[in-house]
Amino acid sequence: MATYKSSGKLDLESPAVEFIEHLTRKKNHVSFFFAAVDLRFEVEPKDSETRAVTISIHGNLTESYKTAKATFTVAPVDDLTASCLAYTFEFEKISQNIEDKKIVESLLTYISLSDVSYKRKFKHNSIDTGYPAEKYFKDFVNAFENDDEVDLGGVDWQKRTFTVSFISAPSMMENFETIKVTITIIQKKEGSRVKWSIEVEKIDDDTQEPDSFLFIACSIRETIQSKFRN
């Protein structure tokens, strides 16, 4: 049985202690970004002294592996206001259907998004509003219907969900064949929540462009947020 390892470093905006506490605040995480329909991360107890944590990876991309896990160690940089994450991914394979790169990219993207969300105090895949869900859903569908950069589809008025596929966004489409976003409006006790997930298909699976994932996530959030003003 073959074992594959991948190691590297990732710069973070957040201080080391604060970020490791943020990452380990809950045991189970679900990726809302990437071509994976189902990719989950289970956080094991951290070592507070060394700021190290091991994450077990589960979901449909891990079916070719007996085990898939990542070990992260977060260290402060010189001014202590930011940090650097050292990572090692380890996969124990049981078949030739290899998804190593997608899993590594997906989890590192999740880490980058978590870092920026924590530092800047906003979520990359949800926005709360003060308006009823039914009204906002109607407004959102109308706004995207009149947007020349996307194709609107899958409108479900009962579940208040729809999809948009980007067709004319050169800055976003440089490294991707397709970018599809599923948006759902959820009624809350007061107001509603706009929540979304992102599915992408890369032009070249052999290239790793984690910064482009972060750029797309930020751009999509800005696009959705702009509809609030329409």
Image: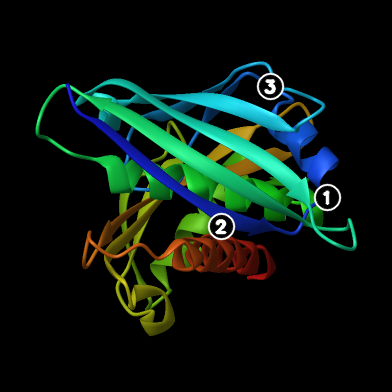
Residue 134 in the image: above or below residue 150? above
What residue sits right under mark 1 in the picture? 15
Helix, strand or loop at disc 3? loop
Q: Quadrant of residue 12?
A: bottom right
Alpha carbon distance from label 3 to label 2? 34 Å
Disc 3 or disc 2, which is closer to the eye? 3
Alpha carbon distance from label 2 to label 1? 39 Å
Quadrant of the frame with the N terminus: top left
What residue sits right under mark 2 in the picture? 139
In this rendering, does residue 4 appear at all?
Answer: yes
Amino acid beneath label 2: Asp
Query: Which residue is at a point 56% across and 57% down the rendered structure image?
Result: 139
Between 113 and 130, the residue placed more toward the observer is 113
Q: x, y (%) of residue 119?
A: 79, 54
Image side of residue 73 versus residue 78, left or right: left
Helix, strand or loop at disc 2? helix
What residue sits right under mark 3 in the picture? 26
Disc 1 or disc 3, which is closer to the eye? 1
Q: x, y (%) of residue 170?
A: 37, 83
Query: Which residue is at a point 60% across and 47% down the rendered structure image?
Result: 86
Circle nearer the N terminus (2, 1): 1
Between 87 and 161, the residue placed more toward the observer is 87
Amino acid beneath label 3: Lys
Quadrant of the frame with the C terminus: bottom right
